[in-house]
Amino acid sequence: MTTRRRLLVLAAAAAAVPPLNAFAATPPAALSSDDQALVDRAVAYLEGLTEARGRFVQTDARGATSQGELFLKRPGKARFAYDPPSGLLVVSDGGKVSIADSRLKTFDAYPLMATPLSLFLAKTIRLDRGVQVTRVARAADGFTITARDGKKETAGQISLTFTDSPMTLVGWSVTDAQGRTTQVRIQGLQRATGLDPSLFVLKDPRPKNVGRGKL
């Protein structure tokens, strides 16, 4: 995969990158009781966010910005529909994350569990089992939780940012094994009901004899 393709995948916080060693050197210190309380609040909020939609603005590691519409349906499902002129569409169907680029005429798919999205799309979010919370940072109007896969099967780390009043997921950033960071800022995230199931289905549009051996 080219550097550009890898950055596009990371842009939706759904990258499958090589096994991680760089972030595995030192186990994180135990959380304070105050930090753990914030983690518990975040978990309760995310588990209650069964369906939602909003806009996102993405800034990749090179500083390039793009935006689009975001749909979430927990557990496991998400859709990032990028505005033109981008041809990128990223969909998690609960088992895999598929990335279609209409401009490059490419299609890639990765197991959801091999991407940072799995940390907050899981049916039961456990930030005390299988996931290492490495940092809880407070801000004037909220806080950020940084976590990585405790089993070291998912490369990189993800930082989730929340506001306090009302508590809302307002963005995240993903850092890959090479230290490149892609930021996603969410605008106007709202709870939704009855999202169309077809939003979370993305099939390979190419002829069956084209490129299938790469998936």
Image: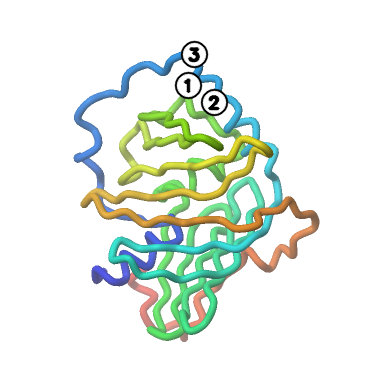
Instruction: Identify the disc placed on residue 85.
Output: none
The kind of secondary structure element at disc 3 is helix
* Depicted 77 relative to depicted 204: above or below: above
Farthest residue toward the front? 140
Crowding near pointer 2: few (<14 within 10 Å), some, many (20+)? some
Residue shown at 62% from the left, 39% from the top: 46
Question: Disc 1 marks which residue?
Answer: 35
Residue shown at 19% from the left, 30% from the top: 25
Determine which quarter of the picture holds residue 194.
bottom right
- Amino acid type, mark 2: Leu
Disc 1, disc 3: CB below 8 Å? yes
Disc 1, disc 2: CB below 8 Å? yes
Residue 62: % across, % down: 28, 66
What's the CA distance linking mark 1 and mark 3? 5 Å
Q: How many marks?
A: 3
Question: Disc 2 marks which residue?
Answer: 38
Q: Nearer the viewer, residue 67 or 52?
A: 67
Question: Disc 3 marks which residue?
Answer: 33
Q: Nearer the viewer, residue 112 or 128?
A: 128
- Amino acid type, mark 3: Ser
Residue 33: % across, % down: 49, 13
- The answer to whether 118 appears left or right of 124 in the picture is left
- The answer to whether 135 appears left or right of 82 in the picture is left
- The answer to whether 96 appears left or right of 9 in the picture is right
Residue shown at 35% from the left, 44% from the top: 154
Residue 113: % across, % down: 45, 46
* Depicted 29 relative to depicted 14: above or below: above
- Amino acid type, mark 1: Asp
